[in-house]
Amino acid sequence: DLDQEAARLLAMVGLPKEFADRYPHQLSGGQARRVGVARAVALLPKLIIADEPTAGLDVSVQGEILNLMTRLQRELGLTYLIITHNLAVVRHVSDETAIMYMGRFVEHGPTVDIFHHAAHPYTVGLLAAQPKPDPDKRREYVALMGEVPSLARRPTGCEFHTRCPRAQEICRRETPGVYRLTPVHTHRCYFPATSDGAG
């Protein structure tokens, strides 16, 4: 019974069954996102890839969508792969985080470790750029110089060296390997923010 299944999925994401008869232009941004979540879980997947799941939504609606996704994860045993620029979302919902620069991973580990012990200078810069809700707390400034290079002409060595405040000669010549800060926290940097020497 397709009508019954549609009503079940709508109820699962907090929408009344009458929404099954609405057109997309009749939905608010948050309602449309809930419909998207319902469509994603309709076939009982084990993995959902969500690209910017809260983009364009008010902060309060973002929280509602994230809480909905977290509840469905718990109830349905889902795994999410979330792609986002919103680090507040990452911190709120993810167990593990991977940071990419120019399409390549530069740091990976448990989210708590990334946010409290960031190693790669790019990660440090991203975290420092996040707005702080406390007006009395001053933001620590981290200089990320220049523009992101062209993917057609990738820099030699570490691709971040053209913007990195910690870059040295080896960074311009040789691509760093994967270094372990802990058994589960890795980075690609010769001079990580967590040490004074090479990784």
Image: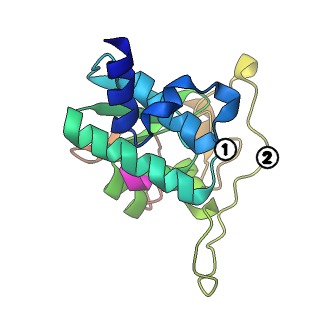
**Residue at 33% of width from left, 21% of height from top?**
4
Give the colouring mode of the picture: rainbow
Disc number lying in front (2 or 1): 1
**From the viewer's perspective, is residue 71 above or below residue 138?**
above
| Picture coordinates of residue 13, whole percent (x, y) | 39, 39
Task: Specify whether 47 is left or right of 189.
Answer: left
Question: Which mark is on residue 186?
Answer: none
Q: Main secondary structure of the magenta part?
A: helix
Q: Which residues are magenta?
A: 91-95
Name the one closer to the observer, 43 or 111. 43
Quadrant in the picture for residue 24:
top right
**Amino acid, disc 1:** Gly
**Residue at 47% of width from left, 45% of height from top?**
190
Query: Judging from the image, what secondary structure is the residue with disc 1 in?
Result: loop
Q: Is residue 55 visible?
A: no
| Picture coordinates of residue 120, whole percent (x, y) | 49, 49
Quadrant in the picture for residue 180:
top left
Name the one closer to the observer, 164 or 75. 75
**Residue at 58% of width from left, 81% of height from top?**
134
Query: Judging from the image, what secondary structure is the residue with disc 2 in?
Result: loop
Quadrant in the picture for residue 141:
bottom right
Question: Which mark is on residue 146?
Answer: 2
| Picture coordinates of residue 119, whole percent (x, y) | 43, 53
Q: Are marks 2 and 1 in contact (CB under 8 Å)?
A: no
**From the viewer's perspective, is residue 188 above or below residue 3?**
below
Q: Which residue is mark 1?
A: 56
**Amino acid, disc 2:** Gly
**Residue at 38% of width from left, 63% of height from top?**
116
How packed mark 1 is, by other alpha carbons closer than 10 Å (few <14, some 14-19, many 20 or more), is few
- First of labels 2, 1 by sequence position: 1
